[in-house]
Amino acid sequence: MSNEAERTIAVIEAYAESLMDELGLELVEVQFRREGHGWVLRIFIDKEDGVTIDDCTAVSRSISTWLDVEDLIEHAFHLEVSSPGLERPLKNIDDFKRFAGRKARVKIKEPRDERRVFTGILESVQDNEITLIVDENKVHIAFDEIAKARLAL
């Protein structure tokens, strides 16, 4: 990802976090990248009882208006606001705590026994370590070992 895209994401995340607090929503992820049909800015939002179309509309309008005023993105882009879906990313320790008991797919930075991906039930979170039940075995993974994680079906 380019430095410009990273900077743009950081500025948008900072604004979106304050907006989510006002609207009672959670910012899950911001993506800004070039795709086949041009640049796309995706904002994934969530809330405890699920995201509605009205939530997406409110965020889209607010972000769009703010971006017009800030003139942050100099080229054409498409703005998409949606829920993260059933396989939402797990970004921080609070996400892991919130979704304890659910199935998760965790990719670690360095292989362990020639394996980097573990899929199982998220049993618990203690301090900065998660415990997954994988094939009836407990797998303990330190939070700083995790490269990517998401809920799994």
Image (cartoon, rainbow, N blue to C red):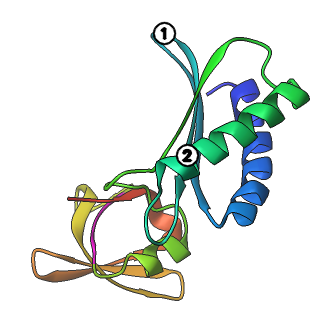
Residue 143 image position (x, y, % from top left): 50, 71
Residue 112 visible in rendering: yes
Q: Which stretch appears magenta? A: 102-107
Which element carries disc 2, helix, strand or loop?
helix
Task: Judge from the rendering whether residue 138 lies leftward or rightward of residue 99; answer left or right.
Answer: left
Q: Looking at the figure, which quarter contains the C terminus?
A: bottom left
Question: How many marks on residues?
Answer: 2
The residue that label 2 is drawn on is 56
Residue type for callout 2: Cys
Q: Quadrant of residue 69?
A: top right
Q: Is residue 103 magenta?
A: yes
Q: Quadrant of residue 108?
A: bottom left
| Residue at 28% across, 74% down | 102
The residue that label 1 is drawn on is 37
Residue 46 image position (x, y, % from top left): 51, 59
Q: Quadrant of residue 81?
A: top right
Q: Nearer the viewer, residue 140 or 80?
A: 80
- Pointer 1 local density, CA inside 10 Å: few below 14, some 14–19, many at least 20: few
Which element carries disc 1, helix, strand or loop?
loop
Q: Earlier in the sequence, mark 2 or mark 1?
A: 1
Image: 132 above or below 89: below
Residue 80 image position (x, y, % from top left): 54, 33
Residue 38 image position (x, y, % from top left): 55, 11
Name the magenta segment's main secondary structure: strand
| Residue at 65% across, 67% down | 24
Q: Indicate which label's residue lies in the foreground, 2 or 1.
A: 2
Residue 145's label in the rendered image is none
Marks 2 and 1 sit apart, C-alpha to C-alpha, by 22 Å
Contact (CB < 8 A) between labels 2 and 1?
Answer: no
| Residue at 64% across, 18% down | 77
Task: Judge from the rendering whether residue 20 lies leftward or rightward of residue 107; answer left or right.
Answer: right
Q: Looking at the figure, which quarter contains the N terminus?
A: top right
